[in-house]
Image (tube, helix red, strand yellow):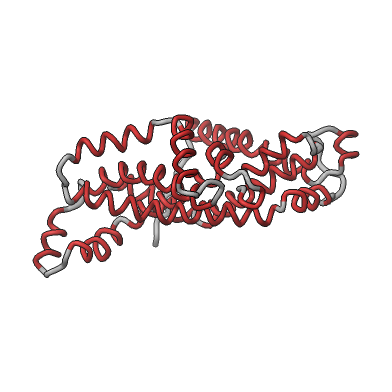
């Protein structure tokens, strides 16, 4: 006969549950309002206000916004830039952290301090030097310029984080690999990268979402319409005062859907990486 353990809920657990439900409602309410207004007609919005549910499905605002900004092109630009930055920044972070965390290169502490200071530097300080150099080398108003800039910015954070993780890597495993004749690159790709995969997955997800949401530097460096990203296209159109409330909601809805889809796809990777980190 098997025994079943029944856990009794305490008043504290009920209070925690209610708090989480309230927090979830508060966080989801803006998305619901945006979704409601994105599928309303302008006449219905004027008659019933922004908080009322839609009486019918009106998709003309979504269609008009898509065609007006060439949203497919902007979506492709954001995917190329964010995906490239995420992959390159993770690779660069791993290589840097391998040298600093395990290789113990000379001046490691000073280099780590520089990476830490780079993470705290505001982007406004970087604008003019980056603008000057990109003009000099002919990369201004190209997607490659933004990819290079954000790869350097994101890898600074990734190097600082991974160096701390790899500095605590078990030395016994590395010594065993060396005794088996493994070289430095083989140790990196066959031992360190597979073991650190959950942490690298978390970095990849964060780098993609952070780069996707970037507005200021892409606004400065991507002035051509065909090179602009989704946040820049939304910001520029908002300033032109060409859209009504329903089309503004449609633009916001289309702008956040790709990031939400990406997060849902890699949610398990993110959860696994954070869980592994907490267990360690």
Residue 248 visible in image: yes
From the viewer's perspective, tell me whether residue 181 is left or right of residue 212. Answer: left
Using the image as rendered, state which of residue 94 and residue 279 is in the foreground.
Answer: 94
Q: Residue furthest left?
A: 179
**In the rendering, at what x and y percent does residue 169 appear?**
20, 51
Q: Residue furthest front?
A: 136
Residue drawn at x 47%, y 40% as measured from the top left: 8
**In the rendering, at what x and y percent does residue 75 appear?**
63, 54
Q: Residue furthest bottom?
A: 180
**In the rendering, at what x and y percent does residue 24 appear?**
59, 38
Res 44 → quadrant: top right
Using the image as rendered, state which of residue 237 and residue 87 is in the foreground.
Answer: 237
From the viewer's perspective, tell me whether residue 206 is left or right of residue 249. Answer: left
Q: How many marks?
A: 0
Residue 6 visible in image: no
Residue drawn at x 40%, y 31% as measured from the top left: 121
Residue drawn at x 79%, y 34% as measured from the top left: 50
Quadrant showing the N terminus = bottom left
């Amino acid at each position: 006969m098997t025994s079943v353990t029944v856990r009794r809920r305490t008043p504290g657990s009920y209070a925690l549950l209610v708090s989480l439900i309230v927090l979830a409602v508060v966080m989801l309410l803006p998305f619901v309002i945006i979704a409601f207004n994105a599928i309303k007609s302008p006449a219905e919005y004027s008659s019933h206000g922004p908080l009322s549910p839609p009486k019918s499905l009106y998709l003309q605002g979504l269609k008009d916004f898509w065609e007006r900004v060439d949203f497919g092109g902007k979506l492709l630009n954001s995917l190329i830039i964010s995906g490239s930055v995420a992959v390159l920044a993770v690779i660069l972070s791993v290589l840097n952290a391998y040298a600093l965390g395990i290789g113990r290169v000379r001046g490691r502490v000073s280099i780590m301090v520089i990476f830490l200071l780079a993470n705290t530097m505001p982007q406004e300080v970087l604008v003019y030097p980056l603008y000057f150099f990109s003009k000099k080398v002919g990369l201004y108003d190209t997607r490659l310029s933004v990819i290079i800039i954000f790869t350097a910015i994101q890898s600074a954070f990734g190097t600082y984080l991974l160096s701390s993780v790899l500095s605590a890597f078990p030395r016994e495993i590395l010594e065993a690999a060396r005794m088996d004749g493994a070289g430095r690159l083989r140790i990196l790709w066959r031992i360190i990268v597979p073991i650190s995969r959950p942490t690298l997955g978390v970095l990849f997800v964060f780098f993609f979402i952070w780069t996707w949401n970037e507005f200021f530097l892409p606004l400065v460096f991507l002035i051509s319409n065909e090179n602009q990203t989704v946040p820049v296209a939304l910001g520029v159109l908002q300033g032109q005062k060409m859209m009504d409330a329903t089309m503004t909601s449609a633009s916001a809805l289309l702008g956040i859907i790709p990031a939400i889809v990406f997060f849902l796809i890699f949610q398990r990777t993110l959860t696994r990486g954070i869980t592994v980190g907490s267990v360690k």
